[in-house]
Image (cartoon, rainbow, N blue to C red):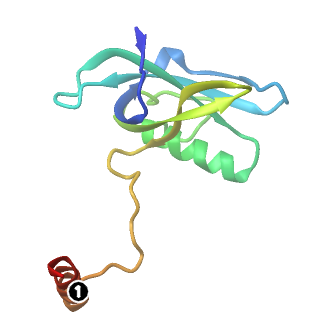
């Protein structure tokens, strides 16, 4: 298996046998999962993999980790990780620098299509037409 070399969003599936748990250097509980990237056309496994590390340091990180695990197919019991490779996920892979080393890391594990911004107050109807007219006038000038 090869590692990916570019930042971006990738469809992937967890490799169930790769799940591991341990402690960080400062004692925080962590979980790691290796993912195999999928071909976007037919979701067939490729030869590229990347590992995600989640942690349980505080309630915010626990929620992020739980959401990532649920996106993979986890059913909510840390004693039973079956289902962890049941679902296709979208990995948001970004460049990260740690102790002087620049590397790609999985920043987010999302349900496919759920990683984008969703506006609470959408522009619709007449407001959308008004914006379109304003932008069209701007572009024409």
Q: Which residue lies furthest to the right in this view?
A: 26
Disc 1 secondary structure class: helix
**Whole-percent x, y for residue 2 in the image:** 41, 10
Q: Is residue 132 above or below residue 66?
A: below
Q: Write the residue at 71% across / 25% down.
A: 100
Depth check, front residue: 70 or 34: 34
Q: In this view, does 26 lie above or below 131?
A: above
**Residue at mark 1:** 134
Q: Residue furthest front?
A: 141
Q: Quadrant of residue 72?
A: top left
Q: In this view, does 95 lie to the left or right of 39?
A: right
Q: Is residue 56 left or right of residue 126?
A: right
Q: Write the residue at 29% across / 25% down.
A: 38
Depth check, front residue: 24 or 125: 125
Q: Quadrant of residue 49?
A: top left
Q: Which residue lies furthest to the top in this view?
A: 1
Q: In this view, does 10 lie to the left or right of 133?
A: right
């Amino acid at each position: 298996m090869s590692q990916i070399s570019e930042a971006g969003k990738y469809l992937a599936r967890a490799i169930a046998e790769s799940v591991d748990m341990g402690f960080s250097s400062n004692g925080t509980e962590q979980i790691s999962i290796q993912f195999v990237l999928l071909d976007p056309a037919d979701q067939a496994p490729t030869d590229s993999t990347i590992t995600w590390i989640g942690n349980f340091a505080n309630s915010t990180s626990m929620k992020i980790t739980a959401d990532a695990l649920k996106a993979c197919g986890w059913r909510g019991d840390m004693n039973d990780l079956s289902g962890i490779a049941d679902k296709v996920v979208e990995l948001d892979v970004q460049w990260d620098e740690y102790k002087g080393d620049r590397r790609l890391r999985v920043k987010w594990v999302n349900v496919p299509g759920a990683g984008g911004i969703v506006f609470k107050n959408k522009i619709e109807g007449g407001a959308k037409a008004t914006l379109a007219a304003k932008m069209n006038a701007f572009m024409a000038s």
